[in-house]
Amino acid sequence: MNEIDLKEFGRMFREDFDLPTVLFQDGGHRIYWLGVPEATAFRCNTYLIVDNDEAILIDPGGTGHFEFIQRRVAQILPPERVVAQVLSHQDPDVAASFPLWVDINPYIKVIASGRTLTLLSYFRDLPFDSINIYDHPEFRFTSGKVIHFIPSPFLHAPGAFTTYDVASKFLFSGDIWAAVDMEWTLIMDDFTRHEMKLNLFHLDYMSCNKAARGYVNRIRELEIHAIVPQHGSIIPGEFISQALDYLERLNCGLDIIYPDLR
Ligand SMILES: [Fe+2]
Ligand SMILES: [Fe+2]
């Protein structure tokens, strides 16, 4: 399967918890949506980037997700081949299961910002291998394929960052562009309706418009084929510019709490 027309794929997709879902494939480079074991408004997404016989987990999830995600990874490749896990920030719904992946592969690299790494040690007091994205803003697979880490401070955590896979041009956005609602599809297809679901998360969780605008400035020139967030639906290519505009004009967090302070 080559690059998928995500919008077309969204129409055909049936929620399927028995098999991993391929979102992108080009030779040995593949991206999977691993699914979620919960049908809640806050449902969490974990993704796997596979490059030949190496794999990287993106936001592995809470401890309650671990068994499901491990089983799903095992349908793709032996879980000990997961060479790294990217933790966009330290929230329990993103990161609490990370020590269980260290138990599977003691050499697994934990990729996060310094601020996140400091807090991760409270989930696991034993040492683990880590990569600070501020020291190493990219990760290179053995094949030479590269992923980039783009800081997104205060969206919502101070040490939050996003991950850009150069081969697929997918942007793994963590909590940015997260949407919450009981009604859910894997790929969204109506931005106006989706905006309401984005608001339910962003108005309360994101810190302020300056943080949002600063991040959009960082990624404006990036060629993005899909935004893949940790909650809610994937945003396919045709809605990317609307998604960037949404974030740029977002009034949220402190803008709402202290409207008179600028
Ligand atoms: Fe979060
Ligand atoms: Fe989250």
Image (cartoon, rainbow, N blue to C red):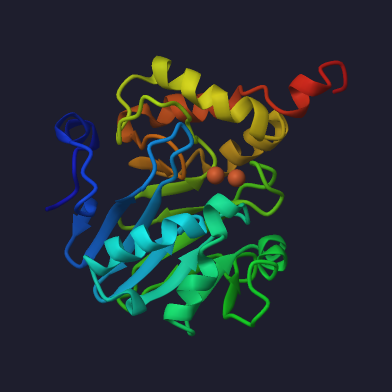
- Residue at the limit of the structure toward the right, as seen here: 261
In this view, the residue in front, 3 or 181, is 181
Q: Residue at x 42, y 61 (%)?
A: 66
> Percent position (x, y) of residue 164?
44, 53
In what quadrant does ligand 1 lie? Answer: top right
How many marks overall? 0
> Percent position (x, y) of residue 118?
72, 67
- Left or right of 195, for residue 24: left
Q: Can residue 59 be seen here?
A: no
Q: Residue at x 75, y 20 (%)?
A: 256
- Left or right of 158, for residue 219: left
Relative to residue 142, is residue 155 depicted above or below? above
Q: Residue at x 46, y 45 (%)?
A: 230
Relative to residue 186, is residue 163 depicted above or below? below
The quarter of the picture where residue 238 lies is top left
Relative to residue 157, is residue 211 depicted above or below? above
Q: Residue at x 17, y 32 (%)?
A: 8
Quadrant of image for the C terminus: top right
> Percent position (x, y) of residue 24?
23, 51
- Left or right of 14, for residue 184: right
- Residue at the limit of the structure toward the left, as seen here: 1
- Left or right of 217, for residue 229: left
Q: Can residue 75 be seen here?
A: yes
> Percent position (x, y) of residue 207?
71, 35
